Amino acid sequence: MERKDQRGHPLLIGGRRKSGYTHGFSYSQIHSLSAICETLVPSLPLDTINKNDNLVDQAAIHSFYKASGAEPPVPDEVAELMVKRGQPKAISFVKLVLTALSFRLGTLLLCGWLCFDWTWPFIHKFSEIPMERREKILMKWSGTSHPLPLRAVFAIIKTYCLFIYFSMTDERSENPAWKAIGYNVDNRQKKAYPQGRPLQKGIIETMHEDDSTFVQSLTEKGLEFMEDPEHNNVYKIKCDVVVVGAGCGGGVAAAILASSGHKVVVIEKGNYFTTEDYTSLEGPSTSELYESGGFLTTMNGKIMIMAGSTVGGGSAINWSASIKTPKNVLKEWSVDHKIPLFGSSDYELAMDAVCKRLGVTENCTEEGFQNQVLRKGCENLGLKVEAVPRNSPANHYCGSCNLGCRTGDKKGTDSTWLVEAVECGAVILTACKSEKFILVDNNDSRRKKKCLGVIATSLNKNLTKKLQIEAKTTISACGSLLTPPLMISSGLKNPNIGRNLHLHPVLVAWGYFPEDALGIKGKTYEGGIITSFHRVVSEESNNVHAIIQTPALGPASVAALSPWVSGKELKERMVKYPRLAHLFTLIRDQGSGEVIEEGKIKYRLSKLDKENLKIGLRQVIRIMIAAGAVEVGTHRSDGQRMKCKGLTEESLQEFLDNVPVVGGLSSKDEYWTLYFSAHQMGSCRMGATAEEGAVDENGQSWEAEGLFVCDASVLPTAIGVNPMVTIQSTSYCISKKIAELLKE
């Protein structure tokens, strides 16, 4: 895609909508939605401003407090985003509730006595109810079990409304709330490419093609193709290897096989962006770079799932952590799971090769605000804190790499492995989604099927013909959430496909550090995202309960994903945003889930997982208090928090005893929370036999000859640390084996 704006790529610069709305909400539904948005983000009198806060720009603060979530175009934008990203059944119920709230009897049914008044007409529609009572209604929906899933309605509207409110931009790519909350978008110098974009030589961006130009592009890239005379709506493309997915695993596979002399075609459903394209704008960047625009959840809404959906995959938007596979995990996989690869020197050499290619270093010149909090808190408690190896230089002080690395210092697959692949003749087709693998009966009795390639479709409707890519070897590298549904929809039956899904579940806590906090400099959105971490180790067994790290959370994410208890509390919290530290606890989960159909993810924590999360979350709170937080809190739905001034060990322990691991959105309990996952693995796991795994030690399907998997789904279990190096090292070994097999 060619960039047409100096600020960045057109898809990433935001701005006012240039086309009409297609959400399909009625006038009455939008009216009710506006009333809810106004309740979530109310206009407040200036005397509610907390005088104790260190507020620099009074004019911006006053404007922020006067502003309301009901102001256009917020409600329409919320409706548009809900329809685009929400689960259809859930959004249909939201619309039903909004319709009911536009009538008095419907409001009575959903809101109870809070809609009553002593004067005619005695019962109010939701939009007529005073603000204070509307807030009580929303908190009642959030906290009380109800025959109707009103908690889900509250959570959906709250999440989308607050994300839109704090990420929406005008034609200058600015948001009026940002100045008030002390947020500045990253505007550091972008890396330029005078010789052209790194992958330009081998990329075909199908979003800019039509049937006639596509043929020319295929010819220019040296691909062998033909239009099927029997099926006029198909292009047949021939190659040696087709790779589905251009992320961590797919990028490595493409590089290894292209450099071995094979003609490689890579299919990627996301778009291609470079450093010059990135804008660091949270709204449009999240929408373009993440799976489901960053709004993917498990079916019950309990876990928010972050996964990359662009050229480079997760490596384009991850937080740079480049940790080798732990030795205890390798031993478990090689011995208990009987997979010799993970105990071999080949795997050790692969990790070394991957780290060298990514330029991994443990050095960090200057840590950002949140990592300073983590390090200081651990040191004050006498806890060990470790440096995190990163695929970026020691002086890489970037807090927005989760929205694409604008300086080009982070070495994702889009700037490393895929560049090598393209230099060796590989071709990458973007905005192109695979539909199914081409499977035929096989005479090989060990594998009943043989894979001959893949059928794909461009997401651009101007490209009307399907793509039938025929190859000697087919590699699925579209990640743990998409590889299983693709294999199952293609007709594969192995019961391990789509199951054993691990998510590295995460819980978050926060601490507030005023500007005068001794020794802790900077703002929450500045500095390397993860440069330090702490392992929470059992004193009895030396087992690791959890690890503690720091996240990248822009203002829209903080507002949308934190608990909401009132409009006043929301605005008070957001003006503190620059000095709000968030730390999370991550576990190596024993529980697992499944993903049989695309977008339909089920997952259950084990009893041990819940215990480890509780231990980790309590440690997070202790660390932030030890670092000097004046207030700390969890993400429990009631806004659980505690002031730290004059805190005694007894009162701290009393608070920590009340920090259990509560259920998710569908829980019947009064309190609930939102869990997070940035690592998905194991859903097409490697096994010593077809009963134990979906693929063998070489990554080849037990059912289909010539079909391999090179992504996180092959990992036998969760690993307990950031998995990028593990994914790439595993793909490296599998790809080397494929290269050997292709020689035969």
Image (cartoon, rainbow, N blue to C red):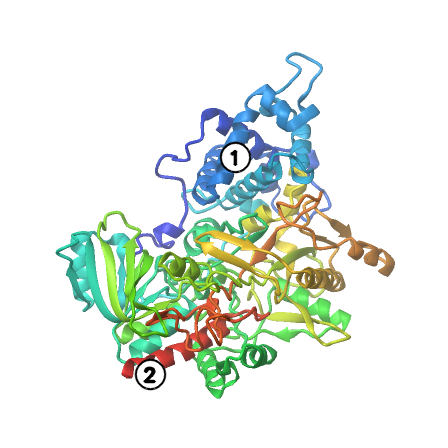
Tell me if residue 360 can be seen: yes
Tell me if residue 270 can be seen: no
Q: Position of residue 717 (x, y in %)?
A: 55, 70
Q: Residue furthest top?
A: 120
Q: Position of residue 153 (x, y in %)?
A: 57, 37
Mark closest to the chain's N terminus, 2 or 1: 1
Q: Position of residue 54 (x, y in %)?
A: 68, 49
- Crowd class of label 1 (few under 14; some 14 to 19; many from 20; radius 10 Å): some
Q: Position of residue 645 (x, y in %)?
A: 81, 54
Q: Quadrant of residue 509?
A: bottom right
Q: In front: 98, or 639?
A: 98
Secondary structure at numbered mark 2: helix
Look at mark 1 in the image and give the residue it sits on: 93
730 above or below 486?
A: below
Q: In front: 484, or 582?
A: 484
Q: Check residue 740 in the rendering and tell me which mark sits there, or answer none.
A: 2
Locate the N terminus by quadrant.
bottom left
Secondary structure at numbered mark 1: helix
- For badge 2, the amino acid type reads Glu
Residue at coordinates 59% horizontally, 47% vertically from top-left? 559
- For badge 1, the amino acid type reads Phe
